[in-house]
Image (cartoon, rainbow, N blue to C red):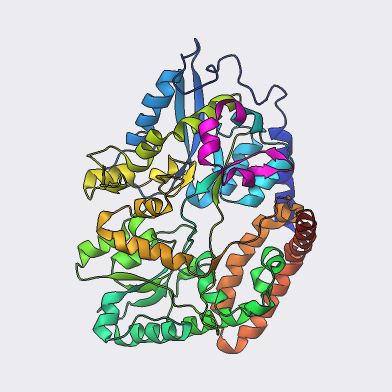
């Protein structure tokens, strides 16, 4: 009850604070630079443009701070200086981004450009009047932005207005399962291709400890709601699931979901998964550390994460014989490998209605969408952190300096989720996302495995009020549910699962489900 009241109060604060500036508009104040390209003559009075920046707590040793490095200096020199704008980055911890952003928005102190991956948060801000309508401004100063983000921009429309600029999701593969191939070879075992074969492989890893961990082996790690979907959904009865069900019905009520969690519970009780998974915070580096230390045998992280987060490279430094291979083992009875994939959009970029720098903010994003700036912000400095191959695809250099430049590139090129070369040559985009040339084949196979039999949730652009109201509560509840269900004693599993789902539905799940069903029916009725 107290949590619900807190969320309701937070929504009211956002409505009050974000609507409190009567002078806010979609045009700049008198200190803004003239409209047009990023090379227009600077105005007489400088302005400061503030931009949110995730702090992922992953800065390599010896690297400069995330607010003053090659990327920020490039931005200031090539966008800020010509336009008489100081670009200032405001850091927000990645693991607390929604909570911190809510506080900033409610206190009218949010940066000029903010972003989140959480759609209910965006819906909340749009409904409460906290966001600038960006449509007219994009038309005025964002022609290149419109061109690059053409596939994703429609997903930023709420109630007929462009309240968000969704980043373009270059690679839609969401998660991919990896296994220590050298461990398989040592045990003379094949790559698992079914859920049951995967189970047998994990049992062999535990019993025979091919990594010589001295009993510290964790056969399967990275256990959380997001990354468990390929495994759990291999137990779903897809013959009973309609597109409307995919959109409206929570996973907990999908036919077969209980069986998937029962399988995970079995793995826990056999000691096959990380027993401390519930202690890891969101975006924890625990799995990366387990991989580098050679104690994790398999996991289902974000697609190609072992490469772009650098832990495959570090594993190889510790153990040159170590080898990861992308697999797609979780299978339904009819041999399919269903898994969610991302839609065409990534993070939602927003400009608070209270911002006095709306036009400058859109100009900045438009500047960012120019090919030469995309190349620099995603790859750094040619000859220092990347080189171009014969097809014009940038490839990272395997040097310490390159890693210190590129480890967080995606937080500066915020209009894109994934490396981007061309809208017309998707294969080049896949190759560009092989960020480390030493792992090019690994990356391509990772993307292919993550896309196999993958689906996207149907799109409905109607804001779901119940989702806005209950999203935070239900998300926190899901973490609790996974822990209680996965760690339950075998004899107690069924009761624990049923009790947890009942509580989830009563605390908002039913309200969200019913409103989503109505919104789906109405939206697709109008599409006919």
Viewer-nearest residue: 143 or 504: 143
Viewer-nearest residue: 45 or 16: 45
Q: Residue furthest top?
A: 44
Compared across the picture, whether 28 is left or right of 181 comes to right
Percent position (x, y) of residue 263?
53, 83
Classify the position of the C terminus by image quarter: bottom right
Could you tell me which residue is drawn at 43 percent across and 52 percent down? 426
Q: Is residue 492 visible?
A: yes
Q: Is residue 417 inside the magenta stretch?
A: no
Residue 515, compared with residue 186, is above or below; it is above
Compared across the picture, whether 277 is left or right of 491 comes to left
Q: Is residue 140 inside the magenta stretch?
A: yes
Percent position (x, y) of residue 227?
50, 66
Percent position (x, y) of residue 134?
64, 33
Classify the position of the N terminus by image quarter: bottom right
Could you tell me which residue is drawn at 76 percent across and 68 percent down? 506
Q: Quadrant of residue 15?
A: top right
Percent position (x, y) of residue 511?
78, 62
Residue 123, compared with residue 217, is above or below; it is above
Q: Quadrant of residue 476?
A: bottom right
Number of disc labels: 0
Residue 121, compared with residue 278, is above or below; it is above
- The span picked out in magenta is 139-166
Q: Is residue 271 visible?
A: no
Q: Residue furthest bottom?
A: 491
């Amino acid at each position: 009850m107290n949590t619900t009241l807190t969320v309701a109060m937070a929504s009211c604060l956002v409505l009050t604070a974000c609507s409190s500036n009567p002078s806010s508009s979609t045009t700049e104040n008198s200190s803004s630079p003239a409209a047009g390209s990023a090379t227009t003559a600077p105005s007489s009075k400088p302005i400061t443009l503030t931009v949110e920046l995730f702090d992922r707590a992953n800065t390599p040793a010896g690297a400069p701070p995330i607010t003053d490095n090659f990327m920020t200096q490039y931005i200031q020199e090539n966008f800020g200086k010509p336009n008489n704008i100081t670009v200032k980055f405001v850091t927000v911890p990645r693991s607390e981004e929604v909570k911190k952003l809510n506080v900033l928005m409610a206190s009218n102190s949010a940066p000029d450009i903010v972003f989140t991956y959480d759609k209910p948060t965006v819906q909340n801000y749009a409904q409460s009047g906290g966001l600038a309508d960006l449509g007219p401004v994009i038309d005025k100063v964002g022609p290149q932005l419109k061109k690059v983000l053409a596939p994703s921009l429609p997903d930023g429309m709420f109630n007929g207005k462009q309240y968000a600029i969704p980043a373009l999701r270059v690679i839609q593969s969401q998660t991919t399962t990896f296994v220590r191939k050298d461990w398989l070879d040592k045990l003379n075992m094949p790559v698992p291709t079914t859920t049951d074969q995967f189970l047998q492989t994990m049992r062999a890893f535990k019993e025979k400890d091919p990594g010589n961990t001295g009993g510290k082996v964790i056969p399967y790690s990275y256990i959380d709601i997001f990354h468990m979907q390929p495994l759990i959904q291999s137990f779903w009865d897809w013959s009973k699931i309609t597109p409307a069900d995919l959109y409206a019905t929570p996973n907990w009520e999908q036919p077969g979901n209980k069986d998937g969690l029962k399988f995970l519970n079995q793995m826990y009780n056999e000691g096959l998964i990380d027993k401390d998974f519930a202690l890891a915070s969101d975006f924890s580096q625990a799995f990366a550390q387990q991989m580098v230390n050679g104690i994790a045998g398999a996991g289902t992280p974000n697609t190609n994460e072992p490469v772009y987060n650098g832990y495959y490279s570090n594993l190889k430094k510790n153990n040159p014989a170590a080898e990861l291979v992308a697999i797609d083992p979780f299978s339904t009875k009819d041999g399919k490998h269903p898994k969610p994939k991302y839609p065409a959009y990534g993070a939602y970029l927003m400009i608070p209605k209270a911002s006095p720098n709306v036009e400058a903010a859109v100009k900045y994003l438009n500047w960012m969408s120019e090919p030469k700036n995309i190349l620099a912000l995603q790859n750094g400095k040619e000859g220092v952190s990347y080189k171009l191959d014969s097809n014009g695809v940038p490839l990272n250099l395997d040097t310490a300096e390159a890693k210190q430049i590129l480890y967080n590139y995606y937080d500066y090129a915020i209009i894109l989720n994934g490396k981007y070369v061309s809208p017309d040559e998707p294969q080049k985009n896949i190759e560009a996302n092989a960020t480390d040339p030493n792992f090019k084949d690994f990356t391509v196979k990772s993307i292919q495995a993550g896309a196999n039999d993958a689906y996207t949730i149907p799109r409905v652009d109607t804001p779901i009020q119940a989702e806005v109201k209950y999203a935070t509560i239900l998300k926190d509840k899901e973490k609790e549910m996974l822990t209680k269900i996965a760690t339950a004693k075998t004899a107690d599993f069924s009761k624990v699962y049923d009790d947890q789902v009942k509580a989830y539905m009563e605390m908002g799940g039913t309200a969200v489900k019913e409103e989503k069903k109505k919104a789906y029916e109405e939206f697709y009725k109008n599409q006919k």
